[in-house]
Image (cartoon, grey):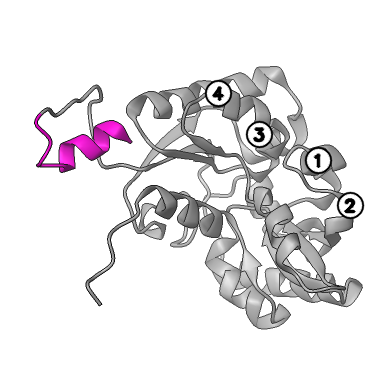
Amino acid sequence: MEAQRAVTDQSSAIVRGGHNFYGVPLGIVMMDTPIPRLPGDVGNATTWPFPVHFRVVKGAGVRRVIHKLPSRELLEPFIEAAQELDRAGVSVIATSGGYLALFQRELQASVRAMLLSSSLLQVPWVASLLPAGRRVGILTMEARSLSPGHLAAVGVTPEMLAGMVGMEEVAGYTHDVYLNARSEFEPARIQAELEDATRLLMSRHPDVGAIVCECTNFPPFAHAIQAVAQVPVYDLVTLVTWTVQAHQRRPFGPG
């Protein structure tokens, strides 16, 4: 951040560098998958209202990340990618795999930048804002693989949660597309299944006061989820956006 400020602060007598490029506040560590990335997906650069730098972890597909964690062998390439982004000078580093919540502590310890492993980091904060009798619901790619360990690693306790629904519990098209890394899909079918998953979540758990989407592929459909649930919907886009904005405060006008 200091170097980025220096190159824009024309009043400074000395400009200091140290990086090959500047003005990119966000770095994203990406899983290796050919799945289409719609606007709103974390892997689509148009999602972000600020510049972003991507690093792909070769061989780390969705199925492997969901089913092979915890694995130090799998973690190390993610640490290396995060460190590369850190050296490049970004202020915030996110990942495209919500299940990496399991390694929030290890990933954060490896870099100086803020590290957002998963949208699930928002659950404790969101839970603290809800009125009495309301709790957080989670929509995830595969509920059976999102363990108490994943949740505890980002500060989520059972008392915060109403429940969760995974895409394996509905028709199965979405689950197949992402876990089997299909290179094409029908967005309307994905949206319909997410709407069904939301109805299932709300019918099972009427005390849901807000939804946090674990999967980074869900944000393009967050508006549809909200239309069904009629509650606030959080995802990695909401988490990253307010975190980056906290690093880029600007003066207000004279009023």
Residue at the limit of the structure toward the front, as seen here:
254
As helix, strand or loop, the secondary structure at mark 3 comes to helix
Q: Which residue is mark 1?
A: 152
Q: Quadrant of residue 65?
A: top right
User: Is disc 4 surrounded by few (<14), some (14 to 19) or many (20+) residues within 10 Å?
Assistant: many
Q: Amino acid at mark 2?
A: Pro
Q: Which residue is mark 4?
A: 79
Residue 208 pos. (x, y %): 81, 71
- Between tags 1 and 4, which lies in front? 1
User: Is residue 151 found left or right of 126 in the rendered image?
Assistant: right
Say whether disc 4 or disc 2 marks the residue closer to the N-terminus: 4
Q: Amino acid at mark 4?
A: Ile
* In the foreground, 15 or 151: 15
User: How many numbered callouts?
Assistant: 4
User: Is disc 3 surrounded by few (<14), some (14 to 19) or many (20+) residues within 10 Å?
Assistant: some
User: Is disc 2 surrounded by few (<14), some (14 to 19) or many (20+) residues within 10 Å?
Assistant: few
What residue is shown at x 87% (from left), y 77% (from top)?
A: 206
Task: Find residue 104 and name its label.
Answer: 3
Q: Which residue is mark 2?
A: 158
User: Which range of residues does the magenta coloring cover?
Assistant: 1-13
Residue 155 pos. (x, y %): 76, 43
* In the foreground, 14 or 154: 14
CB under 8 Å between callouts 3 and 4? no
Q: CA distance from mark 2 to mark 1?
A: 9 Å
